[in-house]
Amino acid sequence: MKRKCVANIARLPASPAPHRRHDATPDGKASAAAVRVAFISQPRDGLSTQGPQQGSVAIVLAALTQSLSSRYRSIALAPALNGQPLGQVTSIDGLPIHHVAAGSRKIEKALELLDPRAMPRSLRTGYYRRYFEHAGAVLARVKPDLVHVMSWAQAGPVLARQLPDVPLLLHLHDDMLTRLDPEEATGRLDPFAAVVTCSQWLADSLRRHVPGYRGEITAIGNGIDPTKFARGPEPERARGSRLLMVGRISPEKGPHVLIDAFVRLASAHPGLMLDLVGPVGFLPLSQARFMSRRMPPMAEAVARLYGSGPAALWGQLARPGERLKERLLAGVPVELRDRIRFLGPQPHDALNDIYRHAGMLIQPSVWKEAYGMPVAEAMAAGLPVIASADGGLCDLVEHGKTGVLVPPGDAAALASAIASLLADPVKARAYGMAGRRKALELLTWEVAARRLEEVYENLLARSVAPEARFMPAKAYSS
């Protein structure tokens, strides 16, 4: 069966060689960390100052700043959570973090869940507006040379008013803007001098959707740390047939499709196990319905797992994780349920050991994933991957080379793909090795950082020279 998607990651530009910057010395060497970049983290998730980051966007921010640390002087602004004092400057491996008021997460979450309107609250212009206003006020004192905004285009108009001479860069991790009217989506992007995306698929989709946008849209990809995801010894994987899903366990990720496929295979493979790693719960119903437009597999997931009427709302408010588990297991024979394990969220630095004990990674998403961080990590760990043939997953998985692509929402096709790898461990191992080679060559943070650096340099070359706005490092503590 031909797949509609292709491996677009190969079309990403090769890691650009370091080049002379506009602030270079006459011999071509860049002056030490003269350019100041301010990263604004997304408002609903904080940055951990101890231990590994937990959210995918936080992982991206921390990894990119670390990869760029020798070339740029960076600061991060993040919401003050868990009692962190406002304005307190902490550090992640030398990256200063300024904690900013973001309002009540509980209130914002309740508003997201209860909002009955068609457009989800997370796309509305007022979403976490206070957070972006407070972040802009901090940066108006710091005077950075460039502001890198994670995820939320709503920050654009606020920051443009407070920092009129500073180029703004938007970093997108999903395709939600492409679901707005093209004119409205273009207006959301207009305050930004450029946009970077986590995949070539997302960059291409956005360009088609907003042809009137005047800035550059560039795919930089995401990354993995090769030192953290090493291929495990083969005997670890030979202990049993273990299927693995990693990430948010929620309807749009397709856990129901994977569980259906597992049930189809379980009797013929008595040693087969299924591990689901990640937090279990629902996205706000309004957002899930918005995402399901023109996407039958996603619409089926919403109808099956959210329910309808008051039950759909109640299921998000009262024990949502347990309720979703109950609905996912409703069609599973009792004798098979102890072979399906919900392992919950795990520290990011514990994932390599989890990958080492798995036979293959399954990413059965029923919506258009913009990237698929667990897929890249599993590839780096040498695991074969089976993924839905849609969105950014096609940038990562090359069908018949590093894994298998199957139609989204098709449990029979997924079961067949799993069975084919179980029956042919030599092929499965070859897919895993090919995936690891690809990950080490194209999917590292250093590769993504070099692509990002090229975007930075193009923006800075068109803006006021950083020396004109220089402030000493102590300004970051204001």
Image (tube, helix red, strand yellow):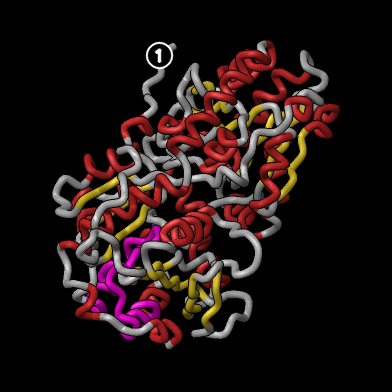
Looking at the image, can residue 430 be seen?
yes
In the rendered image, the quadrant that contains the N terminus is top left
Identified at 35% across, 46% down, the residue is 220
Q: Nearer the viewer, residue 326 or 369?
A: 369
Q: Quick check: is 30 in the magenta stretch?
A: no
Residue 47 is left or right of residue 352, and the answer is: left
Up/down of 438 relative to 135, above or below: above
Q: Is residue 39 left or right of residue 345?
A: left
Residue 73: image quadrant is bottom left
Q: Quadrant of the C terminus?
A: bottom left
**Which of the 4 image quadrants contains residue 320?**
bottom right
In this rendering, is residue 427 above or below 62? above
* Tag 1: amino acid: Lys
| Residue holding disc 1 | 2
Regarding residue 326, the answer to whether it shows in the image is no
Residue farthest along the bottom direction in this orientation:
478
Nearest the viewer among 244 and 35 is: 35
- Judging depth in this view, the residue of 143 and 335 nearest the camera is 143
- Looking at the rendered structure, the secondary structure element under dot 1 is loop
| Residue 162 lies within the magenta run | yes
Query: Is 458 on the left-hand or right-hand side of 88?
Result: left
Total labels: the figure holds: 1
For image coordinates 59% across by 25% down, the residue present is 432
Q: Position of residue 159 (x, y in %)?
A: 29, 73
> In x, y percent, where is residue 373?
52, 43
**Crowd around label 1: few <14 · some 14–19 · many ≥20 (10 Å):** few
Q: What span is colored magenta in the figure?
A: 134-163
Query: Residue 210: horizontal and vertical position, in percent?
Result: 20, 47
